[in-house]
Every structure is written in structure tokens, then in C-alpha cells.
Amino acid sequence: MKIQKSDLIKFKQNQQKIVCLTAYSFPIAKIIDNFCEIILVGDSLGMTIYGASNTIEVSLETMINHSKAVVKAVKHSFVVVDLPFGTYEQSREQALETAKRVISETGCDAIKIETPRNLISTVNFLVKNNIPTIAHIGLMPQSIDKIGSYKYQGKDKQTADLLIEDSIMIANAGAIAVVIEAVPASLASEITRKIKIPTIGIGASVDCDGQILVIDDLLGLNQEFKPRFVENYCNLANIIENAVSKFSYDVKNGNFPQSKHLLQ
């Protein structure tokens, strides 16, 4: 059965953990669909798929194209799409126009925006215009030019208190969930206790209502990038390397193709 936005609140109320992963392609989305409550088409694809140094370079058209592929594959999960940098910050009207386009062209279930305090009113505006919206607080990768590096947020009392206030305002604004990225575990736990909407943690706390990882990190595709909150559940990079090495050997030594591969 397809997950609906109302189900997300029920998961929190029933203390059922929410599993969330990113996907950017039809094959991966099809594989992970039965194991996830939420699939996020994240702007992290700029780094994982296109080799960019950050997420700022990702275009709206790129997000839409990948999201179309993911939505086609999904039968169960709630599909969320990141609005990329520069497509929602200028005004509430810009955000609404972008969100409407993403939902209409992809068929996704909700959008996600990085949510500094000045954009909480945008969340409320989107919700009032029937756009299911997930917020994102803590480390916000689209703000890398402002913060300078990918570092933990909310480590001092002042910024922690501000994040707690932001999360309460976000919940009151009507967001259906909030992603909390790279904050101290105690802070993420407190936010999870204080608000009625689900929290999705990444580098946050086991007490969050759900957890998200970038699928490429989970699979161990990028061995050069491993922040402390990432767990490689396999080393797919080595598996691919070994398979390609064997193929290369077989071709160079006349072992491929064999008769079974050919029409006689």
C-alpha cells in the first residue's frame, strides 16, 4: 500500500521508525522501495552522480528528470524531491511556482526545502497552497558558501536554542516532517520530543523518528567520502572494480564472448 502523508504522523505517534534513503534512478528506487517509508530524490545527486563539489550547481531540470525516473519505479514509498538552490529562496511565490512544477511534472508526493528561519513563512505559504512540505534544519548543504564547511550545527546553547525554536515554528507552519542534519544527539532528541511532526535524522540522534542516508554512502560507492554519521553496509566500489577487472582480463585474453553468448 502506498504511504500517504498522514501515515508519517501515525508512525511517530505509534513510535514506528521511518526508514528513508535517497534514490536518483529507476533501478535503485525499485530495489529500495519495499524497505523504505520515504525515498528522497536529493540534490546530493550533484555530488554523487555528477561529481560536483557541492549541491549548489544542481538545476531544477536535473532534479525533475531524476525524480520522474524514481516515481515511475515506486509503488510503496512516499517520494520527496529537494527543491534545488536558487529555485525557492527569492520569494514565497517563487517557491510555490517551483513546487507546483516539480509535483505536476514528476508525480512526487512532497517537496523538501532547506529552512533557515527566514524561510519558515515560506513553508507555511506552501502548505496553505496544498503543497506537502518537509523542512530541513541543522547543517544545510545549500548554504555551504555561508557556513564555509560541512560542520556540525547547534553545538553551543545559543544556536541550539534557536534550532529548537525553529523546529517548533516549522511544525506550527504545517510541515509534514523535518530533516535534522549534523547536530548533537542530545539536541536532536530534544527537538524530537518537543514537536508533533516526525524528525528524520542524519548525523543526529537514534531518538529521531526516522533516519536517512545517501544510498551511495550506504553502498560504499565513494570510498573517499565518509563523514562520521555514515555507515557503509557494503563495499560496492570494490565489487564493481573486481567485476570490471575480470571482464577486462577476459576480453584481453579472448575468453569473452564465449559460444553461449553468440548466435550460432
Image: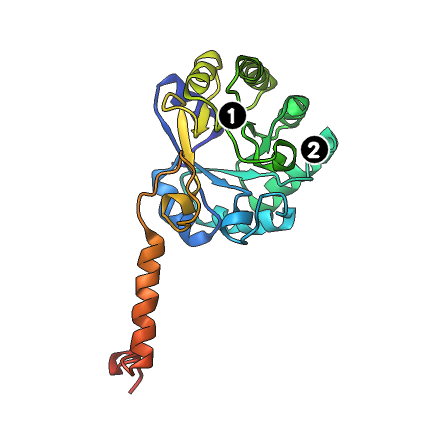
The residue nearer to you, when weighing 131 against 59, is 59
The residue that mark 1 highlights is 178
Q: Amino acid at mark 1?
A: Val
Q: Amino acid at mark 2?
A: Glu
Q: Secondary structure at mark 1?
A: strand
Residue 172: quadrant of the picture: top right
Residue found at the far bottom of this picture: 264
**Snapshot colouring:** rainbow
Within 10 angstroms of label 1, few (less than 14), some, or many (20 or more) residues?
Answer: many
Tell me what residue is drawn at x 57 percent, y 50 percent: 52
Residue 151 percent location from the top left of the image = 52, 31
The image quadrant of residue 226 is top left
Foreground residue, 199 or 174?
199
Q: Is residue 22 left or right of residue 169?
A: left
Labels in figure, total: 2
- Residue 59 percent coordinates (x, y): 64, 48
Pinpoint residue 22: horizontal percent, then vertical percent.
45, 42
In this rendering, position of residue 232 left or right of residue 201: left
Cα distance, mark 2 to mark 1?
A: 18 Å
235 vs 257: above or below: above
Q: Quadrant of residue 162?
A: top right
Please tell me how crowded label 2 is: few (under 14), some (14-19), or many (20+) other residues with Cα within 10 Å. some
Quadrant into which the N terminus falls: top left
Q: Residue at x 51, y 25 (%)?
A: 178
**Viewed as shown, does residue 8 lie left or right of 119?**
left
Label 2 belongs to which residue? 89
* Residue 205 - label: none
Q: Residue at x 68, y 35 (%)?
A: 88
Q: Residue at x 62, y 42 (%)?
A: 102
